[in-house]
Image (cartoon, rainbow, N blue to C red):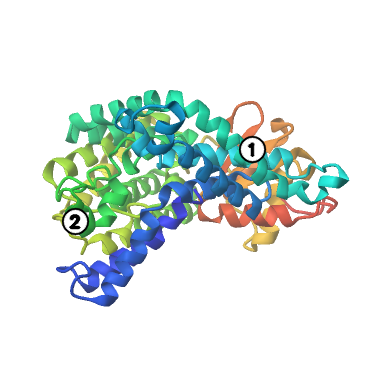
């Protein structure tokens, strides 16, 4: 999520640029051109940002040496796999080089290199060499090892990349050939994969230049994309537009339904959760705090939500109601995209959203009551979660979470993305799930034998940082838990 976090900067710069000069797209205003070009500088280099950002984000202590290693590895791999280099290494005519190598500078390769670079950093950043080579010990050793790993990666990809690329392109083309139906299918699986975080892998195929679709950069490119023939008004953005009615209207409608169906004594508690989560969904497009509030309590209801999301994206694509985003489908991104030349009938997404607000509200309410689903506030007496009593002070809240997870001695790794703590535990049975939820967690996801994700919403990264600051020697026995 580190490289993805740069997209809002591009969206803001380009969005404001299009607002200033909606007709000339920079041709009639030097300031507009300045802003649009600045934003496109980010979009045009997303592949290397993924290499640097993933390496940094997955390093155990978020060190710049890992980011540098990601950059070094990306340069080695993409240089060795450029069409000219492939022709020279294999001794073939440049015209015979597979077309896949013309697309080697992509996010898939950036992510792959970033993962390898982070793993090398985590394993070898504290290695001490012989005194004669002491200067290259520790973190200075990592970029060197990554450059050699880059050679190995390039050698492997030289033979398997055409097949991988061909498979990705075939998959993308298969969905594209289904047109609006394909967009709906993509949206359905996008929501369905959120519980395990694999929606990011799926998104990369449709939103970025992995299989030639590149929906987000092409949309943000606006006039430039139109001029280059990489974007078509009314079509480009079809894998994004239909999410606006869901995130801005549908999910808040679901939140209202869950509030109205909660037990009377729990309504105040549920209201505090749903208002915060609903506002985050509407304003920023961050939906996980709301989705995790019911996806494990009522999985059937979550599948229904995924189906409605697919229908929404299908409708928007069919009707050519188009808007795009740089971060997520919330109000901020909708406003910024309205003057983009590729935004077509964007205001109809609001109309569609109002309809989906009603659909979500009435469908969720009817299903919850009909099947007596245990959504927030409707739990049985012996399993009802306590009211959220976590400290309002972030440092103290971090101590509460740390204690509920079994203390420092039980944590092997602490990390976070935009909305979740990502933890590796020595003994996962020591983590008190009920207490974590009482502290404010919207959900807990168990992966493998010792990995745990705690859904906190936008506070996740802050809490993770505070947890890391707590000394391992600090006594947590005095920390009060709900």
The answer to whether residue 304 is above or below residue 348 is above
Quick one: SS at disc 2? loop
For label 2, count other residues whose C-alpha is less than 10 Å away and answer few (under 14), some (14-19) or many (20+): many
Residue at point 69%, 60% (across, down): 395
- In the rendered structure, the answer to whether residue 136 lies left or right of residue 160 reads right
Q: Quadrant of residue 34?
A: bottom left
Question: Does residue 411 appear in the picture of this structure?
Answer: yes
Quick one: SS at disc 1? helix
Question: How far across and down, in percent of the image, does residue 19 sit?
Answer: 23, 70
Question: How far across and down, in percent of the image, does residue 78 sit?
Answer: 46, 41
Question: Does residue 304 appear in the picture of this structure?
Answer: no
The answer to whether residue 8 is above or below residue 26 is above
Residue designated by label 1: 119
The answer to whether residue 66 is above or below residue 372 is below
Residue at point 45%, 34% (across, down): 198
Residue designated by label 2: 343
Residue in the foreground of this view, choosing between 43 and 473 = 43
Cα–Cα gap, marks 2 and 1: 41 Å
Question: How far across and down, in percent of the image, does residue 127 sit?
Answer: 79, 41
Question: How far across and down, in percent of the image, does residue 453 sit?
Answer: 58, 39
């Amino acid at each position: 999520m580190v490289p993805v976090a740069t997209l809002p900067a591009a969206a803001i710069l380009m969005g404001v640029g299009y607002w200033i000069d909606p007709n000339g797209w920079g041709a009639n205003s030097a300031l507009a051109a300045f802003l649009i070009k600045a934003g496109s500088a980010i979009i045009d280099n997303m592949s290397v940002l993924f290499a640097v950002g993933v390496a940094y984000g997955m390093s155990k202590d978020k060190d710049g040496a890992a980011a540098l290693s990601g950059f070094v590895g990306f340069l080695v791999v993409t240089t060795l796999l450029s069409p000219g280099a492939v022709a020279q290494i294999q001794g073939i005519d440049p015209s015979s080089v597979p077309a896949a190598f013309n697309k080697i500078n992509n996010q898939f390769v950036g992510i792959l290199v970033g993962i390898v670079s982070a793993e090398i950093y985590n394993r070898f950043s504290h290695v001490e060499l012989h005194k004669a080579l002491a200067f290259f010990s520790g973190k200075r050793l990592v970029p060197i090892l990554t450059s050699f790993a880059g050679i190995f990666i390039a050698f492997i990809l030289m033979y398997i990349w055409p097949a991988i690329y061909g498979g990705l392109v075939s998959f993308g083309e298969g969905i594209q050939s289904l047109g609006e139906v394909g967009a709906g299918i993509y949206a359905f699986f996008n929501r369905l994969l959120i519980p395990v975080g694999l929606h990011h892998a799926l998104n990369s195929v449709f939103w970025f230049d992995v299989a030639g679709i590149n929906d987000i950069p092409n949309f943000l490119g606006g006039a430039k994309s139109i001029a280059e023939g990489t974007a078509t008004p009314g079509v480009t953005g079809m894998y994004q537009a239909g999410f606006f009615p869901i995130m801005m209207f549908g999910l808040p409608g679901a939140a209202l339904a869950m509030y109205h169906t909660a037990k009377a004594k729990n309504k105040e508690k549920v209201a505090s959760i749903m208002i915060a989560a609903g506002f985050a969904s509407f304003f920023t497009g961050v939906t996980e705090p709301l989705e995790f509030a019911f996806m494990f309590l009522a999985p059937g209801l979550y599948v229904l939500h995924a189906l409605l999301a697919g229908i929404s994206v299908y409708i928007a694509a069919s009707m050519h109601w188009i808007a795009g985003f740089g971060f997520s489908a919330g109000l901020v991104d909708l406003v910024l995209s309205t003057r983009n030349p590729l935004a077509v009938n964007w205001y109809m997404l609001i109309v569609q959203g109002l309809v989906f607000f009603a659909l979500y509200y009435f469908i969720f309410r009817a299903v919850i009551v009909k099947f007596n689903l245990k959504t927030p506030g409707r739990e049985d007496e012996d399993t009802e979660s306590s009211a959220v009593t976590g400290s309002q002070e972030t440092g103290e809240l971090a101590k509460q979470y740390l204690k509920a997870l079994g203390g420092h001695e039980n944590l092997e790794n602490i990390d976070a993305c935009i909305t979740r703590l990502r933890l590796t535990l020595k003994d996962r049975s020591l983590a008190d799930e009920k207490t974590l939820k009482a502290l404010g967690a919207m959900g807990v996801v168990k992966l493998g034998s010792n990995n745990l994700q705690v859904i906190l919403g936008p506070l996740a990264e802050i809490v993770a940082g505070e947890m890391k600051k707590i000394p391992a020697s600090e006594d947590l026995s005095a920390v009060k838990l709900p």
